[in-house]
Amino acid sequence: MPDQPPAPATGADESREQPFDRLFMAEYGKVVAIAHRVLADRPEAEDVAQEVFIDFHRRHPATAAYAAGWLHKAAVHTSLNRIRSRKRRERRELSQPPRETSDDPQRVVEAEEDRRLVRVALGRLSPKAASVLVLRYSGLSYVEVGTALGVGAGQIGTLLRRAEQALKKEMNRAPSV
Amino acid sequence: MYDEPLALDAGDRTHYQSCASCQERFGEIAGSARHGAALLAVAGATVDAEAALARVKAAVGSRPAARGGRLLSLPVRSWRTPALAAAVAAAMVATFAFTSLASSLAQIFQPTQVTPVSISSGDLTGLDSLATYGDVKWTQRPELKEAGSAAEAAGASGLGQINPRYLPAGVAGKPVTYGAVAQSQGTFTFSAAKATAAAQAQGKPAPSFKPGIDGSTLVVQVGPAEAAVFGDVQGLIAKARAGGAGDKPGASGSGTQDAQSALTTAGPLLAVAEVRAPTLSSTGASVKDIKALLLAQPGLSPAVRSAITSLDDPTGNLPIPIPADRVTATPVTVNGVKGTEIGDNTGLGAAVIWIKGGVVYAVAGTVSKDDAVKVAQSL
């Protein structure tokens, strides 16, 4: 006898929504920061954060012990997927206003070039290397980074150093886009 | 030490103060870390979490949500229903088949990249006679088996779990049906005698086989494979059954129309399939010989010739047939590899196909092309 389809969930399930609200308020800022770190585009980062939370809401209970780690990792991967999309990347880079306010034009050019290349280089790193960089520089602790990536906190320092070297290497080979 | 300075105890600090090697190492690490941090620096900003939560709740308000610890709710039903089995099997093999024979052509190799080839139905007629060039046998027939979950399907196929992190609104939260197909194997043995007899029966000249081709056997291995179908499969089954109730045994054509009608009216459906890239080994004929034999056939269209020519050895392109008059194909990058997206954004139908790590991936369904790509990127 086949299984029966599940009864549809009601929108007014307060016992479920309250934990989700608490999770959202606790983690939304971090998820946006992670996406922003990858994308360097604030509106798109908020778009990614919304997508990640909707996906989580659909598939996981808010009380899951892995909730925060899942959200952090999903924010990195969703953002990396976006920068790997050539059209979106080009569109975003074209729309980037100069952020450097230095009086030195050479410095402005170099800074913008670095920011552009680092997004290209990030997209070329292995998912783990890119993730450890983004999560750590987004302000997560070693424990939080380890939880998101499923590795021990004791390994994060080594992974971080390797990822920095890999990023540097990719920066040196990143062609102009 | 650079990232967590407070983790150092007094003994370590004392050692560091007097150790030039450690200080030099620290300088390198600190420089690397500062460089990385500077590259990834972005402007700080505050977030309006309350407003964002309201937007998210509005977006998810009408969707079924996850309950308990289960990732997905699984109303698994029998896949023995021919219409569904055919639909899912079609989605799985559509990655590399436009005719049974042409699929064998693709399997001559270990393709690493998909390439769209525009064709029309008339393009394939030139290949018809090839079916008479030998004997086809299945030594391990493909058999679709249902699975209760993504993990179960992955366990059966040995491939990765199908668990997209993005699903279009039309199929998000809908039931998911999983299936897997074990590796299958077939052979095609060239027979000059059979080819000659078939040609004579049709009043055509006997084909010319190069030495070594007659009697050689191609062994094709396909799969294993697995698929997940997101959407109202039960509705599809019911509609297909209702539409096919009046069919008579042996009738053809109406079944296809019923299936198309059922697919159109069943609501959004999305199939995600993973198939181990097909491989082929030969007991005698070389790839070059087989390509020469195929290209020698009269009546091949330029598109089919191009498809055959594009096949390479030992690795190469997997031609994806594109009905040029009905859909368009454009290149797309999926998770770092080149693939092909087919269809448009009308929601009537779209697909994305790519090969990565020796596995052919396909996302197809009654969704927009943008959504199909998003699903592909989220795998």
Image (cartoon, coloured by chain):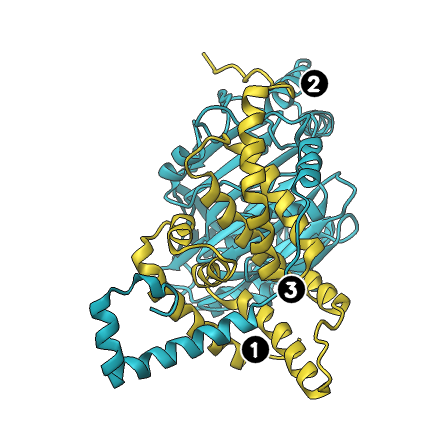
Chain colours: A yellow, B cyan
According to the picture, the residue beneath numbered tag 2 turns out to be B243
According to the picture, the residue beneath numbered tag 1 turns out to be A174
According to the picture, the residue beneath numbered tag 3 turns out to be B43
Residue at 65% x, 83% y is: A110
Residue at 71% x, 71% y is: A99
Q: Is residue B127 above or below residue A70?
A: below
Look at the image and tell me in which quarter the N terminus of chain B lies.
bottom left
Q: Is residue B189 above or below residue A107?
A: above
| Distance between mark 3 and mark 1 Cα atoms | 23 Å
Give amino acid for label 2.
Answer: Gly
Residue A59 spot, x, y in % from top left: 53, 33
Q: Secondary structure at mark 2?
A: helix
Give amino acid for label 1.
Answer: Ala
Few, some or many C-alpha atoms within 10 Å of disc 2 (few <14, some 14-19, many ≥20)?
some
Few, some or many C-alpha atoms within 10 Å of disc 3 (few <14, some 14-19, many ≥20)?
few
Of the image marks 2 and 3, the number of the one nearer the N terminus: 3
Q: How many marks?
A: 3
Residue at 56% x, 55% y is: A34
Residue B242 spot, x, y in % from top left: 67, 15
